[in-house]
Image (tube, grey):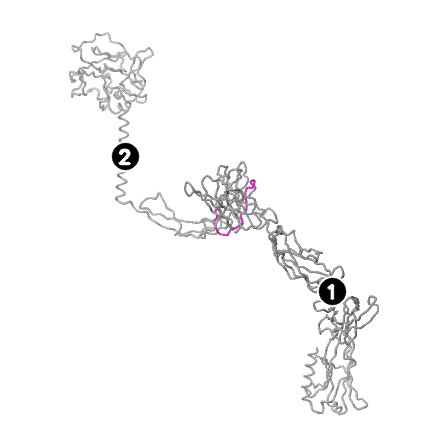
Amino acid sequence: MVGLGAWSLVGAALIILLLPRSLEQCGHILLSAPIVRLGDQVMASCIINQNCSHLVTEWRIVWKLEPELHPRQRQQHLPNGTLQSTITLPHLNLSRVLLSCCLHWGNSLQILDQAELQAGYPPIAPHNLSCIMNLTINSLICQWEPGPDTHLSTSFTLKSFKSQDQCQTQKDSIPDCVPEDGQSHCSIPRRHLQLYQDMSIWVQARNALGTSISPKLCLAPMDVVKLEPPTLWALEPSPGVAPPQPGCLRLRWETWKPSLYIEQKCELRHQPRLGEAGWDLVSALPARTPEYELCGLLPSTAYTLQMRCTRWPLPGHWSEWSPSLELITAQRAPIVRLDTWWRQRQLDPQTVAVQLFWKPIALEEDSGQIQGYLVSRRPSDQAGAEPTLCDTTELNCTFQLPPEAREVLLQAYNTAGSSHPTPVVFLESRGPPLGRLHATARDPHSLWVGWEPPIPPPQGYVIEWGLSPPSPNGSPMTWRMEHNGSIAGTLLQENIRPFQLYEITVTPLYQDTKGPSQHVYAYSQEMATVLNASTHSFVLRGLEPSSLYQVHLMAASQAGATNSTILTLMTLALEESELHIILGLFGLLVLLICLCGAAQFCCRPSRKYSLWPSVPDPAHSSLGSWVPTITAEDIFQLPSLRDPGMPPITKITVLEEEEKKPGPWESNDGSGTGSLSTLVQAYVLQGDPRVPSTQPQPQSGNSDQVFYVQVLGSPTGPGPGHYLRCDSTQPLLEGLTPSPKSYENLWFQTSPLGTPEPLVPHPEDDSIFEPLLDFPLLQGLRVSGAEGLGGF
């Protein structure tokens, strides 16, 4: 508001410069009060002197309260010849405003005089007065809170005097202390003080509307002394002192030198440097022994420490907190469980390469930090220990062992010591396998793998998963161990990316063995597969040569399918050389089959007689040994002849064979018995052949001849048939006991009385009788029909 008033005055001056000289000193403003309370009434008068009063008849006086004109006014001529215009402002609601007395000059408004009005409140008494004795600057510093804004310029003054009887008696006055503008504290120098004498102190606030004072404070400067904070240091280890225990810190401090002879006590606070934990306070540390061992902290953890002190047992103020000191607690040997897994590969008969993996799991909250891992064959603290296989900060290592080695030891260590050794036993796969391993995607960044637990249930499982095929950068498989053998599945969320094919391996673990590992493949998230013919192929087999085919290819997944274009192709014809090779091989195969079949038929006696007949010597054979096999289905029946007057005949031709000169069969061109050679004679039997003949049999002069028989007769004739046998001394068709089998010779069958009888066809059977081709002696003959029997 001050700036606004100054600007308005400058503006008014510029306008006045434009006024005639006769108007420059024409009027001035008189106020009832330049400063009032907010909301109070203000009265103002504008006096026009005698020299200018005659101009008022031409011009009119106007009041302006920035930024508005106020037409309410009274204007009158006083007896002394001056002109007075009066205005009343009933409520002044602005803390600072400019009031102007103006005249209309033509078409413009001309300012005659201006006055600034201020409104506000009386000062409120300051409060929360406090003082401290700062021995660093050797002054008594007091501060207070000034109260709310009064909208007016307010001054503060720190007043005090020396006193006795707890400030009941005032003695020497102390010079006032006036703070700088805008500040609410002030310092009384040491030269005006008596450190151990009481003094009364208060603050006075004053502005244009009034004055107020704060409550008085009675104190001795040394009772409000405030020490400077101490300086913290880490206590260095000494040769004769044992190092601090895990979770402990040793520190020392130095007090402020001006306070060396002041009895005091200190406080220590600490908090972990990392994390969101608050400050922990340790109270009442003795200042005479500036050393302290702080315990109960987390091992191998960085802490921030601060300290402050105060006069004690006399009253005083706490110092500020010292600058921070950062220390790390002593290490503690790791207390962890190491889950392990391994892969083995046989390099040669004497060496096995082992890749060992592990994961540390802290068993206690304050377990020591791990600085590295050791893999050895024996504990490192035993005498004669073998060299360490691995000393690494990674979570895996590769080493070589002899084939008989079945166990190694794994330890985690830090500067404080090592964890308990974890035996790693290379188990054999002799346990029962899992049942029905399967995997599905839950979301783009997780896979659910499930299985049927074997019986008995294992102690736990090892689950491995990774990209399939492995990524080019050779990222290792991710794995974890499940110690609950009764579960039937787990959710994999580590290192899972969408649209990737993963190979998942699950291995059950038992007490002293493991089960076989099983694999399953699953996509974390599928999409329609993009075909890439440069990396996939398929061979179509079993196609016909020189044929036209259409090939359709479709790739499908759970997210959709993609169809390829239709491929039309024609298979090639066989080349001439290939055809020759195939036909040659086929011919060789047929020839081989024929040779094998011929050899089989020739080598078996039962097969030999089915190809050609064999005529044995009747003297050295029996009918049962050379009669070919015949079944019931092959029985031939002789029908009646066409001529009913001529009885049908059955003709058996007897061949005479020279002794010891068996020869081939011979045939002559004659018909009937008269045309046969001398070696053949015909005998005719009429009547029933079953009736024995009583006629004498003619004897042949040649006793060396063997005759066979031709029988003529009609099985259907009414008269008895004739039977004639040769005069040979050789038995021919003699005793037929035992009778031939039904499949040997159906012409001769044994009657119920034991007498052989020929098979007689039924008269009602209208089938045509064919020659009895099954008779052994007739198998080599060609028979053209029944009518040919007359010329046999």
Along the line of sight, the residue nearer the viewer: 529 or 135? 135
Q: Which amino acid does label 1 sit on?
A: Val
Vertical relation: 104 (above or below) 259: below
Specify the farthest residue to the front.
Answer: 240
Q: In which quadrant of the rendered image does the N terminus lie?
A: bottom right
Which residue bears the numbered disc 1?
Answer: 225
The disc at residue 767 is none
Residue 590, disc: 2
Q: In which quarter of the image is the C terminus?
A: top left
In the image, residue 478 sits, relative to residue 774, either above or below, namely below
Q: In which quarter of the image is residue 381?
A: top right
Q: Is residue 172 above or below residue 279?
A: below
Residue 14: % across, % down: 67, 86
**Residue at (81, 72) in percent of width and height:** 172
The span from disc 1 to disc 2 (Cα, nearest Å) is 127 Å
Along the line of sight, the residue nearer the viewer: 654 or 289: 289
Q: What element carries label 2?
A: helix
Q: Magenta segment range?
A: 484-503
Q: Between 733 and 125, which is closer to the camera in this rendering? A: 125
